[in-house]
Image (cartoon, rainbow, N blue to C red):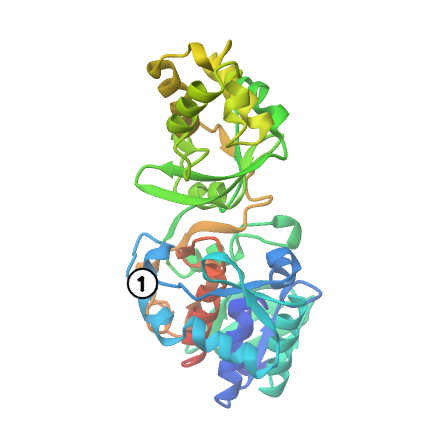
């Protein structure tokens, strides 16, 4: 049996940073992952350029049944801290909209940076190794794996949620948490495209590939970003964001032109170009295919010059207040993250240690902390991994 001070299960964002920090403290660390390569979710993120953090990170941009839980870790290891790490490795990056930071070249640079720091910290990285059983004996844990047995004083579980199962995602972390008496908050796909019923698809299928800036609302949540029509429903950043707040049966409201006063635009067209068809007038502000679909949905025909203010207002409302009820989402298959997870109330917000089991830690996506789209979930992984790494 191989003995270590610390075992970290899961060589993703949180697990890598936790292992680095523990190793730097002089702890003997083994980092175990069932995949053949570390950091696979990092590698594919951001279109291959890794949206590695967000300069606007704040607790209010995370969802959890305990909204205060994330504050400690996020305040002690910030976006600026991770940016400093990236800069120290001379990895070039750029900022896109809304504080999102991406590598100029490749996400592989972030993976290489973290793996390199693991080696420098003396971390024993074991890939293609599956953990089959975990037991606690006295003050230590015993791991039975496909590479034999390991013993450790501290165990950090960083195996993520259920998102993207084709990359090996499982409910492993939840099963281990339940084994040691921790509660699991309801899990569901988040940051995921939404699906339309067939009757609505019949109206929108011709719009597949059309993208607009939109404001999407569900309850009190609202996001103004790009929306993309697909052959199955809607996607794009605005939809991915609202999907974290949407539940089956909920209605969402979409403003397809939030920066334009469509009623005024239509009134101006009525005054100056009265012979225009309504969809032609709309196409001054919207993609033509979308303008045509809205006109059909609103029953707008004839000449715009013949329209009363009331009819123009109704057409404008079809643009600004489109209410739809999605029938589902694309699910864990392509969801960027898993909403819910291990109940934060069972963990220390400072160390991520299970309150019921000394020496057991849960970090990253497995915990009931889910960020907005745009680098927030990576920052939670770095922050929670760092927090646990200071004490394991």
Which residue is more in the foreground, 273 or 18?
Answer: 273
Going 50% across and 22% down the picture, which residue do you hit? 294
Which residue is more in the foreground, 228 or 331?
Answer: 228
Q: Residue furthest bottom?
A: 26
Q: Residue furthest front?
A: 272
Asked if residue 116 lies left or right of residue 237, the reply is: right
Going 56% across and 21% down the picture, which residue do you hit? 292
Q: For label 1, count other residues whose C-alpha is less than 10 Å away and answer few (under 14), some (14-19) or many (20+).
A: many
Going 48% across and 50% down the picture, which residue do you hit? 338
Number of numbered discs visible in the structure rendering:
1
Residue 201 image-quadrant placement: top right
Q: Is residue 199 above or below residue 43?
A: above
Q: Secondary structure at mark 1?
A: loop
Q: Is residue 26 above or below residue 86?
A: below
Q: Quadrant of the C terminus?
A: bottom left
**Residue 321 drawn at (x, y percent):** 38, 28
Going 51% across and 54% down the picture, which residue do you hit? 161
Residue 176 appears in the rendering: no
Which residue is more in the foreground, 299 or 335?
Answer: 299
Which residue has dot 1 on it?
A: 69
Q: Is residue 128 above or below residue 139?
A: above
Q: Quadrant of the N terminus?
A: bottom right
Which residue is more in the foreground, 88 or 108?
Answer: 88
Asked if residue 84 lies left or right of residue 138, the reply is: right
Residue 19 appears in the rendering: yes
**Residue 117 drawn at (x, y percent):** 60, 82
**Residue 251 drawn at (x, y percent):** 39, 29
């Amino acid at each position: 049996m191989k003995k270590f001070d610390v075992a970290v299960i899961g060589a993703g964002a949180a697990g890598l940073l936790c292992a680095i920090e523990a190793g730097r403290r002089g702890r003997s660390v083994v980092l175990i992952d069932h995949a053949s390569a570390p950091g696979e979710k990092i590698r594919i993120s951001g279109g291959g350029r890794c949206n590695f953090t967000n300069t606007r990170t704040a607790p209010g941009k995370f969802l959890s049944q305990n909204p205060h839980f994330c504050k400690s870790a996020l305040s002690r290891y910030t976006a600026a801290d991770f940016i400093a790490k990236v800069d120290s490795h001379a990895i070039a990056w750029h900022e896109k909209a809304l504080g999102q930071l991406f590598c100029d070249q490749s996400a592989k640079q972030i993976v290489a940076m973290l793996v390199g720091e693991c080696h420098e910290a003396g971390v024993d990285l074991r890939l293609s190794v599956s953990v089959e059983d975990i037991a606690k004996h006295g003050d230590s844990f015993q791991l039975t794996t496909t590479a034999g047995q390991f013993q450790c004083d501290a165990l950090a579980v960083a195996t993520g949620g259920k998102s993207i199962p084709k990359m090996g995602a499982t409910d492993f972390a939840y099963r281990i948490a339940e084994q040691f008496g921790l509660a699991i908050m309801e899990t569901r796909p988040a940051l995921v495209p939404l699906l339309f019923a067939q009757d609505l698809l019949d109206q929108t299928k011709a719009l597949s590939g059309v993208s607009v800036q939109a404001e999407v609302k569900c309850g009190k949540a609202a996001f103004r970003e790009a929306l993309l029509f697909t052959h199955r429903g809607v996607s794009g950043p605005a939809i991915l964001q609202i999907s974290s707040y949407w539940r089956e049966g909920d209605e969402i409201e979409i403003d397809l032109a939030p920066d334009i006063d469509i009623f005024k635009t239509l009134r101006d067209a009525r005054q100056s170009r009265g012979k225009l068809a309504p969809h032609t007038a709309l196409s001054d502000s919207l993609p033509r295919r979308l303008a045509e679909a809205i006109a059909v949905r609103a029953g707008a025909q004839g000449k715009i010059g013949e329209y009363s203010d009331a009819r123009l207002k109704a057409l404008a409302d079809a643009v600004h207040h489109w209410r739809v009820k999605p029938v589902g989402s694309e699910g864990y298959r392509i969801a960027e993250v898993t909403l819910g997870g291990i109940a934060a109330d069972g963990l220390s917000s400072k160390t991520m240690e299970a309150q019921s089991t000394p020496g057991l830690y849960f970090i990253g996506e497995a915990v009931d902390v889910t960020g907005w789209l745009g680098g927030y979930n990576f920052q939670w992984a770095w922050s929670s991994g760092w927090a646990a790494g200071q004490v394991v």
